[in-house]
Amino acid sequence: MALLEQCVHLDADVRPRKEKGFFTVTVPPPWNDPARRAAQAIQDQIKEWSKQYPNVVCYCFDGYSTLVYVL
């Protein structure tokens, strides 16, 4: 929950699925060079934050989407 609270303040689309134990963070289109750099910065920030939580796994499927799952 704490990581979700941090992520909702990012400039991205955060979709919680608390009942399933995960949430997604996506940078919405347009997916041009500035958006790609912003998306990478957001992913890097989420990865850094997730290190604080040993039961959290962070998956990055592409440059714009991140899945955060609680074990």
Image (tube, rainbow, N blue to C red):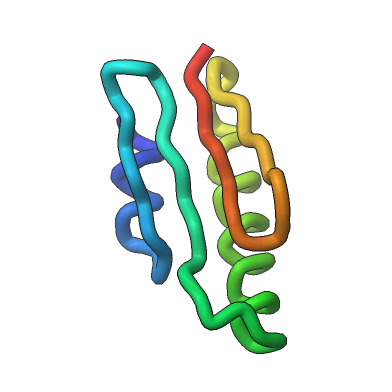
Give how far across and how far down residue 29 sits, in percent: 51, 76
View extreme (top): residue? 71
Q: Residue at x 34, y 45 (%)?
A: 15
Q: Depth check: 8 or 33 in front?
A: 33
Q: Quadrant of residue 60?
A: top right
Tell whether 10 sits left or right of 47: left
Tell whether 40 sits left or right of 1: right
Give how far across and how far down residue 3 sits, in percent: 40, 38
Give how far across and how far down residue 10 sits, in percent: 40, 64
Tell whether 31 sits left or right of 63: left
Q: Residue at x 55, y 24 (%)?
A: 56
Q: Residue at x 47, y 69 (%)?
A: 28
Above or below for 52 versus 46: above
View extreme (front): residue? 30
Q: Residue at x 40, y 70 (%)?
A: 11
Give how far across and how far down residue 70 sits, in percent: 48, 19
Tell whether 10 sits left or right of 18: right
Above or below for 18 versus 34: above
Looking at the rendered image, the quarter that the N terminus falls into is top left
Above or below for 14 versus 42: above
Count the marks: 0
